[in-house]
Amino acid sequence: MQKKKPVVRLLRIIMPIVAIICIVMFPPWEGIWAWITPLPDTVQEQLDDAIDSGLDGMIVYVDQANQPPALYAAGWKDRAAQIPADPQALFKIASISKLYIATAVAKLVNKQNLFLDDTLADYLPELVGRIEYADQITLKMMVQHRSGIPNYVDEEEFDWGNPLMEISENLALVLDEPADFEPDTDYRYSNTNYLLIGSILDKVLGYSHQQYIKSEIIAPLGLTNTYGLLSDVNLEDVASGYYTKYDGDLKTLDYVVPGGSMVATAQDVGVFLRALNDGALLNDDEQAIYSAIYKYEHKGWVLGYHSIARYYKDIDAVVIQFVNTTGGDMELLSNVVYGRIVRILRREQ
């Protein structure tokens, strides 16, 4: 053990130097430029600047206290057809879908249809011996990404450009794999958790959890542009998606797994997020359960689509951003632009 210490010390010196050299020689210029330039006067100007920096299309929804909700758009909805960005376009919201599933869990736990301390083995006994610690992993641990179950999208066989169309096919990628850690001893984001929660919901309900979300969450809010699957919508209503290393449109790629499959407009996501945060969606008991198990914001990413949904208490504002470009430095640029939009809103307070 003593022989390793000089090597460790040397690495501690070398690695920061290597990192600095990489930053200097291969900097993410678009993100840096967007970060250091002065803020424009308006949100719309910021979107226009972002398109000039390399993003294909953007949609932003802002719901700020004492102001009417505002929608902004810039760039292209469909680059090849030269169709301008449409603020009412549908978008693949990817992992933002997890907020809706966590909400469904909170409601069903309150009704005692689900129990947070029941285990994966209790709900899906067929997975005992196929997922390590199935008899120790609780529903709550899965909701909170503390289960240790490997993330199927990290497996070598998973291909974002050729997604598997069956939940069982995605799950099979991690069956019989060792756990990332013992249950509830660490945190690691894993899409497999929500794939399994979706399956548990389907089994307990006796029908699709997406139908439950529609009837118990979406419909009460009066939302008409939120869907469980891409196959539920007219593709012409969906914004095209682009990847920097691919020339085509990624709109038709369908990700069917729970926790990543939903499609919605920015406005619908914003209305949902406002209701989730201000208590209009859940009753007091449901809200207490939700607060104990999950967060109130989320990002989403699938090939060609990057989304951010957050609420800012200090300015009482919901800010939703959709960007239909991924790859390279585009996610960094998207995040920087989002932060600048929030700064503009704060400045206007």
Image (cartoon, rainbow, N blue to C red):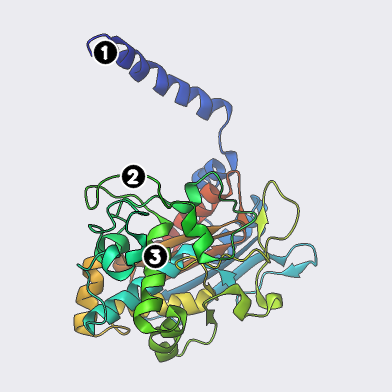
Marks 1 and 3, how far apart at CA: 43 Å
Q: Which residue is mark 1?
A: 5
Q: Return the residue found at the far right.
A: 81
Identify the residue shown where x is 60% and y is 73%. Answer: 230
Where residue 83 sits: x, y (%)? 75, 70
So how many labels did they put on this image? 3
Left or right: 202 as drawn, with respect to 231: left
Q: Earlier in the sequence, mark 2 or mark 1?
A: 1
Give the SS element for disc 1: helix
Q: Quadrant of the C terminus?
A: bottom left
Identify the residue shown where x is 43% and y is 58%. Answer: 191
Q: Which mark is residue 195?
A: none
Marks 2 and 1, how far apart at CA: 27 Å
In this rendering, the answer to whether 189 lies above or below 76 is above
- Density class for disc 1 (Cα within 10 Å; few <14, some 14-19, many ≥20) is few
Q: Which residue is mark 3?
A: 196
Three-letter amino acid code at the position of disc 2: Asp
Question: In the image shown, does 153 or 26 lie closer to the viewer?
Answer: 153
Q: Earlier in the sequence, mark 1 or mark 3?
A: 1
Q: Which residue is mark 2?
A: 180
Three-letter amino acid code at the position of disc 1: Lys
